[in-house]
Image (cartoon, rainbow, N blue to C red):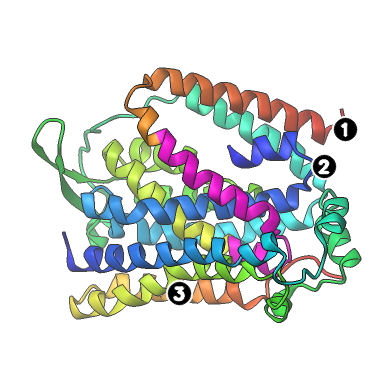
Amino acid sequence: MFVPIVGSFFPFSLDFVRAAGLIVALAGSLAATPFQLRRGYAYLKLMLPAGLVSSVGAIVGARVGLELPGSLVQLLLGLCVLGIALLMLFARNAEHPRIAAPDPLSVALGINGTYHEASTGETVRWQVRNTPLALVLTLGVGFLAGMFGLGAGWANVPVFNLLMGAPLKVAAATSTFLISVSNTSAVWIYLSSGAVLPVIVVPSVLGMVGGSRIGVRLSAVVKPHAVRFIVVGLLILSGARALLKGLGI
Amino acid sequence: MTEQRRAYADLLDVLVKVGLILVVATFVPHVLGILSPRVSIDRSSELWSLPLDEYLARTEARPGLWWVSTLRYADYLPLAGVAFLATVSGICYLRVIPVFARKGMTAYVVIAALQVLVFLVAASGVLAAGGV
């Protein structure tokens, strides 16, 4: 949400905002990943192939995004953000998808696992399907993330969960892990292109770290559908603003 | 927990803390005015609404690895912290590649090695955009 909101309501060029957005998302995902790995929700085997593909997409997306006119990027960002809002409104994640049979690629790569579900005390075994298609989609998601400076959880989680059939906790945690890799690649492009302004980046990273600590405490008392309502509302508002800005209105 | 997952998590945990401290610590000289900036904050605020190529032209900045030569300036020094954060994943990959190799997980050795190569290409500056 950083890029849509800051890009729409602050005077900074979208080039600098996108770089800052990638770094904020990178810092957040790097900080969260050790915990998710140790809890057994994030998986190297699930992330590594997708991370490689997504990194390439992110580099291409960053490069393309920095060549396009700002107004066009703003317009496309608005459309993308509104699409994300719709996805969040209508997509229904599955906590424990049922997999009839894993695909041959996932079997060859050994993409499967078990984790302890604390809420039920059960050991959950999982495997995945549609790995080749998921990798293709991950390439596209990486492209969008690099181009618009977004964290890609809004797309990676449905890919891992709904398409591949990974349990929701595994999908969400591995998505965070994936962002730490794909955003790394895109950040280097923005850094070497001169698009990283520390005066924007550092306060934003500090704000993210502080905000996430507050958010963790609030998440214990705020209802999930209220959070969803707020997030979708902010996305629609900022997406519409970006669209109008891109149209010169 | 597998050996590779523990190795990755343990190293990442340390490196990200170092990286976040570096990002903040390298910004302090700018905030306190201990070092001189290359582009004053007043000048930067006049220009930060411009597209990247115009900003670079007006600040006489260059794409590629040129930023490394500017780390002595207060407004560029935090890029060292950002670059460190962007290196963390690559270091963790290098940590787990030997573990994959020892376990005979050849496919993951190849995937991880390719990923490190992608990081290196991205960091080299050859794919940079913009410039005067």
Amino acid of disc 1:
Gly
Q: Quadrant of residue B103?
A: bottom left
Q: Residue sitting at 57 percent across and 65 percent down?
A: B82
User: Label 1 marks which chain's residue?
Assistant: A
Front in this rendered view, residue B25 or A109: B25
* Residue placed under numbered mark 3 in the picture: B116
Front in this rendered view, residue B118 or A26: A26
Whether the magenta-drawn stretch holds residue B51 is answered as: no
Front in this rendered view, residue A177 or A86: A177
The reply to whether residue B129 is visible in this rendering is yes
Q: Is residue B19 above or below residue B125?
A: above
Given contact means CB atoms under 8 Å apart, are the residues at marks 1 and 3 in contact?
Answer: no
Given contact means CB atoms under 8 Å apart, are the residues at marks 2 and 1 in contact?
Answer: yes
Distance from disc 2 to disc 1, alpha carbons, whole Å, reads: 8 Å
| Spot occupied by residue A125 in the image (x, y as percentages of width and height) | 14, 44
Front in this rendered view, residue A33 or A103: A33
Amino acid of disc 3:
Val
User: Label 2 marks which chain's residue?
Assistant: A
- For label 1, count other residues whose C-alpha is less than 10 Å away and answer few (under 14), some (14-19) or many (20+): few
